Amino acid sequence: MFSALTPNAALFLAGIFAILVIASGVVFALGRAHPDRDYTELAARVNSWWVMAGVFAAAMALDRVLSIVFLAFVSFLAMKEYFSLIPTRRADRRVLFWAYLAIPVQFYWVAIGWYGMFIIFIPVYLFLLLPLRMVTIGETTGFLRAAGSLHWGLMLTVFNLSHMAFLLALPQAANPAGGGAGLVLFLMFLTQFNDVAQYVWGKTLGRHKIIPKVSPKKTWEGFIGGVATTTLTAWLLAPHLTPLTGWEDPAAGLLIGLAGFVGDVNISALKRDLGLKDSGSLIPGHGGVLDRVDSLTFTAPLFFHYLYYLHY
Amino acid sequence: MARFLRLLFYALVARPIAWVVLGLNVRHRQRLPTTGPAIVAANHNSHLDTLVLISLFPLRLLPRLRPVAAADYFTRNPVLAWFSLNVIGILPIRREARGGADPLKPCEAALERGDILVLFPEGSRGEPEVLGRFKRGIAVLAARRPDVPVTPVFLHGLGKALPKDDPILVPFFCDVFVGEALRGNNDQAVFMAELEGRMARLADELPSPREDS
């Protein structure tokens, strides 16, 4: 059944669900111990983790193509949310339509493993194609803002996130322990774990604000504690799921910890600019899709190229 | 047969469009009527409005749900008429009353049968994402049946996804805010003011004034 997973990856997936069982147990115990306090938000958040982990695990475990389709769908949700948030010109409806069509094409390059096309399709070809479509429509008022914001979103939600899918297209022989799915699980788990770790460290020890203009709740204590936790966790996990060796293991965690933080505050800055608290309401307790994949938009391409440079 | 086609259409086309291609942010869903007779009144910006509103209800209520639509527009040719009447399942009404015929008669008869009417009091789709004035027909209907709840629903974003003058559907997340039901009143002006007021308050629930130019 779990044909797409190596034994290590399957074991790791089971471990993720064990963590969720513990998280649900803690929420239940908290509710029992403090009946006067409201844990609805926390419970909703953990329940949403169950749903997200469940869907993700099913997609990863069953089949490689299904995994890629699933990741393409995540890109679609993120892009749709981005286009729904930002001001768009009515004249650009057809340009947006082309941008949506880029998703299946980009993930097709991933599915057939054509690295050269995968890496230039959006930064080069769509970068040229979208303005071409815009000038044939001919609306020049707000042209720069529209062209810039469309391509920025395309890079963030499709190009960057598709790097996670390309981990599945890398040669399996180079990573017999974890396989492609092991790499995706490693990246996905550490990125989300880093978010949670930064949050927990910040909640318990946070004193000194790190970036108050963008994200007033983020602290140096949360940032350092989170990055350190992620680095240590990566050190433990990397030998079992990735081809990384020696110093490369903790360095991968350091990279994911730092990049995850920047990806998170990048979307925070976008929301602050637009005057919004959450990017959407699709995921109870979390907000929107962009709120959940914000860190991944930075960790996915950086982790991919780190790994690609060192081992492929 | 037509009933089966309609079920297939709403289950396999309308719902995936509403929930997957678009994606709906629904607030106060529990305020929707769970049984007929009832009236759902929404603002109108797109052909998608009907599909979205009907997708908010469980499929078992589908035979009860009747979108009220202009006969002159939706039955203007035989193919469209067949599709509108059998697959969309519209309740056609005549916008311009000729020879003293009561255009609301079919609506009253449907309420009599226990149906849930889906109405667009703006009359037509109008300017995308602009809340137009409501026509009074709904006040007349509600005054005749003061026992029937009228639930206002504010839709936002559908005029961006599929506006009046463009056949291409571009996905956007859309907002659906359900208001509290009101009842018919013999003073139509009072009813209209209340309905438009509730609609405006629902519109105020939008997270921020977005510039959709």
Image (spheres, helix red, strand yellow):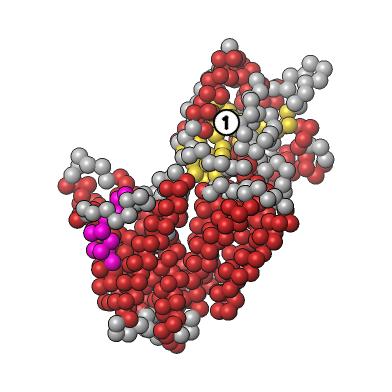
Q: Is residue A218 magenta?
A: yes
Q: Position of residue A193 (x, y in %)?
A: 32, 64
Instruction: Determine the image quadrant of residue B53.
Output: top right
On the image, numbered disc 1 is attached to which residue?
Answer: B40
When the figure is inspected, residue A160 is found, relative to residue B193, above or below; the finding is below
Question: How many marks on residues?
Answer: 1
When the figure is inspected, residue B95 is found, relative to residue A131, above or below; the finding is above
Q: Position of A264 compared to B26: left or right?
A: left
Query: Magenta region, mostly helix, strand or loop?
Result: helix
Q: Position of B26 compared to B18: left or right?
A: left
Q: Where is residue A112 in the image (x, y as percent from the top left)?
A: 58, 78
Helix, strand or loop status at disc 1: strand
When the figure is inspected, residue A22 is found, relative to residue B71, above or below; the finding is below
Q: Give the range drawn in magenta.
A: A216-227
Query: Residue at 65% of width from left, 56% of height from top?
Result: A95
Mark 1 neighbour density, 10 Å: few (under 14) some (14–19) many (20 or more): many
